[in-house]
Image (cartoon, rainbow, N blue to C red):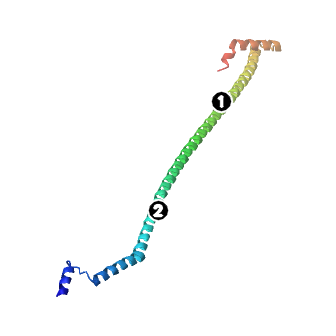
C-alpha cells in the first residue's frame, strides 16, 4: 500500500513520472535530433534553395520582360522610322514625277509652238508664192487684154509700166486675204 500511495502522489493527471516516461522523453529527443539532422535540415535547405531559385527566376523574368519591352519600343521606333522614310521616299518620288511631267508638258508646249511657228512661216511663204504667181498671171492677162484693146504690141517697157500701174491701183491688200 505504501507503493500505491507514492504512485498516487506522483501521478499528476494522465502522465506518470516513471522510467518509461523518461525513456520516452529521451527517445523523443533523440528522434528529434535525428530527424533534425537527417530530415528537417535538408528539407529546410531544399525549401530555402527552391525559394531562392524561384525568387531568382521571378527576378530574371522581370528583367526579361523589361528587355522585351525595350526591344518592343525599339522595334516600334524602327517601324515608325521606316514608315516615315517610306512616306518621305514616296513624297520625293511624287515630286520628281510631277517635275518630270511638268518638264515633259513644257517640252510638248515648246514643240507645239515651234511647229505652229514653222507652219505659220510655211503658210506665209506659200501665201507670198501664191500672190506672186497670181501677180504674174494677172500681169500676163493684163498684157493680153491691153494688146487686144490697143491692137498693137507694146514695147516691153510700156508693158511693165502698165502692169505696175494696174497693181498699184488694185493694191496689195486686195490680194492678201
Q: Which mark is residue 56?
A: 2
Find residue 37 and report its image quarter.
bottom left
Where 33 falls versus 94 (above or below)?
Answer: below
Q: Please indicate, yes or no, whether residue 155 appears anywhere in the rendered image.
A: no
Where 15 falls versus 107 (above or below)?
Answer: below
Residue 147 placement (x, y as % from top left): 77, 15
- Image quadrant occupied by the N terminus: bottom left
Task: Report the number of discs.
Answer: 2
Which residue occupies 46% across, 59% down? 59
Residue 79 placement (x, y as % from top left): 53, 49
- Left or right, 163 with reference to 5: right
* Residue linked to disc 1: 113
Where 31 falls versus 104 (above or below)?
Answer: below
Q: Please indicate, yes or no, whether residue 71 appears anywhere in the rendered image.
A: yes
In primary-sequence order, the first of circles 2 and 1 is 2
Residue 163 placement (x, y as % from top left): 75, 14
Q: Residues within 10 Å of mark 1 (few under 14, many from 20)?
A: few
Is residue 19 or residue 73 the one in the foreground? 19
Find residue 3 and report its image quarter.
bottom left
Residue furthest to the bottom: 1
Question: What's the CA distance linking mark 2 and mark 1?
Answer: 84 Å
- Left or right, 112 with reference to 51: right
Q: Residues within 10 Å of mark 2 (few under 14, many from 20)?
A: few
Is residue 105 or residue 2 the one in the foreground? 2
Amino acid at each position: 500500500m505504501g507503493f500505491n500511495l507514492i504512485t498516487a502522489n506522483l501521478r499528476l493527471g494522465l502522465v506518470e513520472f516513471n522510467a518509461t516516461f523518461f525513456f520516452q522523453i529521451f527517445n523523443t529527443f533523440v528522434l528529434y535530433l535525428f530527424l533534425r539532422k537527417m530530415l528537417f535540415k535538408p528539407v529546410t535547405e531544399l525549401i530555402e534553395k527552391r525559394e531562392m531559385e524561384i525568387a531568382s527566376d521571378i527576378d530574371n523574368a522581370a528583367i526579361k520582360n523589361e528587355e522585351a519591352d525595350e526591344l518592343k519600343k525599339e522595334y516600334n521606333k524602327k517601324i515608325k522610322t521606316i514608315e516615315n522614310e517610306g512616306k518621305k521616299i514616296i513624297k520625293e518620288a511624287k515630286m520628281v514625277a510631277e517635275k518630270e511631267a511638268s518638264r515633259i508638258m513644257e517640252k510638248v508646249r515648246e514643240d507645239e509652238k515651234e511647229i505652229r511657228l514653222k507652219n505659220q512661216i510655211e503658210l506665209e511663204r506659200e501665201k507670198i508664192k501664191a500672190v506672186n504667181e497670181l501677180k504674174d498671171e494677172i500681169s500676163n492677162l493684163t498684157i493680153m487684154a491691153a494688146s487686144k484693146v490697143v491692137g498693137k504690141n507694146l514695147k516691153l517697157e510700156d508693158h511693165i509700166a502698165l502692169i505696175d500701174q494696174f497693181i498699184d491701183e488694185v493694191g496689195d491688200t486686195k490680194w492678201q486675204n
